[in-house]
Image (tube, helix red, strand yellow):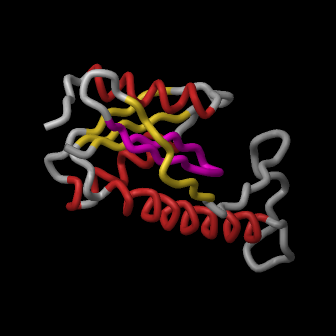
Amino acid sequence: MKRMGVWIDHRHARLFEVSGKKALEASETARLESGAEEVPRSTTGHVTNMPAHGVGGSGESARRHAEHRREHALADYFKRVSDPLSDADLIVILGPGSARQELATALERDRRFDGRPRFVYSADTHMTDAQIAARIAELAGDHGVTSA
């Protein structure tokens, strides 16, 4: 049985493979960068003084284009992260923000992952390599997964 784990945020992902029978260990197999640019937000959180349609520019169009580029970059990123996970029998997803759930949603939509258990957990942003590996191994073990 192949067990994999991923620690992910919108900037990068770290993939781990879980091994062992009684004492599970996770070793890092890959690091992937998202390449998604941050989209600047207004300090007030709303659009200010939008001109009438067709009159001048407010920068809103540039922001929409940047958001569109970011969405495409993230979709590509989640695809690149999911490819190495495609032959895993069990997947543990960790992360500090919404990227972990976005990856889980991408896996739900991907037929390659039909019927394969996936577990999604919140994780601290500042975990060390050893802490991430240990947490993934622990979570894989918590789900009663043992080597065949």
- 86 or 19, nearer to the observer: 19
Name the residue: 47% across, 25% down. Answer: 134
Q: Main secondary structure of the magenta part?
A: strand
Name the residue: 47% across, 34% down. Answer: 94
57 versus 140 height, above or below: below
Please provide the residue range marked out in magenta. 5-19
Residue 40 place in picture, x, y as percent: 79, 53
- 74 or 66, nearer to the observer: 74
- 19 or 63, nearer to the observer: 19
Residue 79 place in picture, x, y as percent: 43, 64
87 versus 89 height, above or below: below
Rendered image quadrant of residue 63: bottom right
In the rendered image, the quadrant that contains the C terminus is: top left
- Report whether 108 appears left or right of 136: left
Rendered image quadrant of residue 52: bottom right
Q: How many marks?
A: 0
Q: Is residue 54 rendered magenta in the image?
A: no
Residue 57 place in picture, x, y as percent: 84, 73
- Report whether 134 appears left or right of 110: right
35 versus 119 height, above or below: below
